Amino acid sequence: MTLKNLFLQGIFPFDGAGLEKPVPIHSQLSHYVPDGVINQTLYFRGGNSSPELVTVVLMRDGIPMRYFPIGAKSDVHVPLRVVEDIEGGSLIELLLLADKGVGGYLVVDLGMVEH
């Protein structure tokens, strides 16, 4: 079995659009799991430069899987340790929930492995 490490990561500016609906952070924070492959999330790390709480939402095919709240000017590390398999043909995305008018920079790092 061949394992392939994948990371959705980077530092991105953001402007909050409200807490009602998650919005894309950046196009680099999405990944299509190829058919015939199993994806497993290993960890999420995030940092928030804004003075308000924000939440990163891990989505699978448009449905929220996990919520990662990141405190004001704070960070979070969540070991996921292969919580569940994500089947091939799925779209994984990281989206943002933040109050309107809240802005800053978001640091995200979602570690995954595919086999």
Image (tube, rainbow, N blue to C red):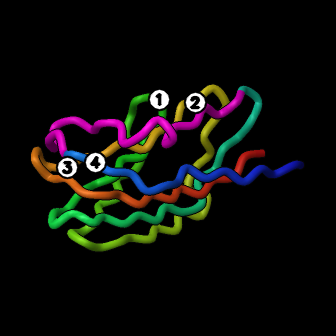
Q: Tell me, yes or no, whether the two marked residues, 2 and 1, touch with CB atoms within 8 Å.
A: yes
- The residue labelled by disc 2 is 90
Could you give the CA–CA distance between mark 2 and mark 3, rounded to whole angstroms?
25 Å
Q: Residue at x 25, y 57 (%)?
A: 104
- The residue labelled by disc 4 is 14
Could you give the CA–CA distance between mark 2 and mark 4, rounded to whole angstroms?
25 Å
- The residue labelled by disc 1 is 61
Quarter occupied by residue 22:
top left
Is 114 placed above or below 82 here? above
Q: Is residue 31 magenta?
A: yes
Q: Residue at x 43, y 56 (%)?
A: 11
- The residue labelled by disc 3 is 98
Query: Callout 2, which amino acid?
Result: Ser
Total labels drawn: 4
Disc nearer the start of the sequence (1/3): 1
Q: Magenta stretch?
A: 16-34
Decide: few, some or many residues near mark 3? Use Cα within 10 Å; few <14, some 14-19, many ≥20: many
Disc 2 versus disc 4: nearer the observer = 4
Disc nearer the start of the sequence (2/4): 4
Q: Tell me, yes or no, whether the two marked residues, 2 and 3, touch with CB atoms within 8 Å.
A: no
Could you give the CA–CA distance between mark 2 and mark 1, rounded to whole angstroms?
6 Å
Q: Residue at x 29, y 61 (%)?
A: 69
Disc 4 versus disc 1: nearer the observer = 4
Disc nearer the start of the sequence (2/3): 2
Q: Secondary structure at mark 2?
A: loop
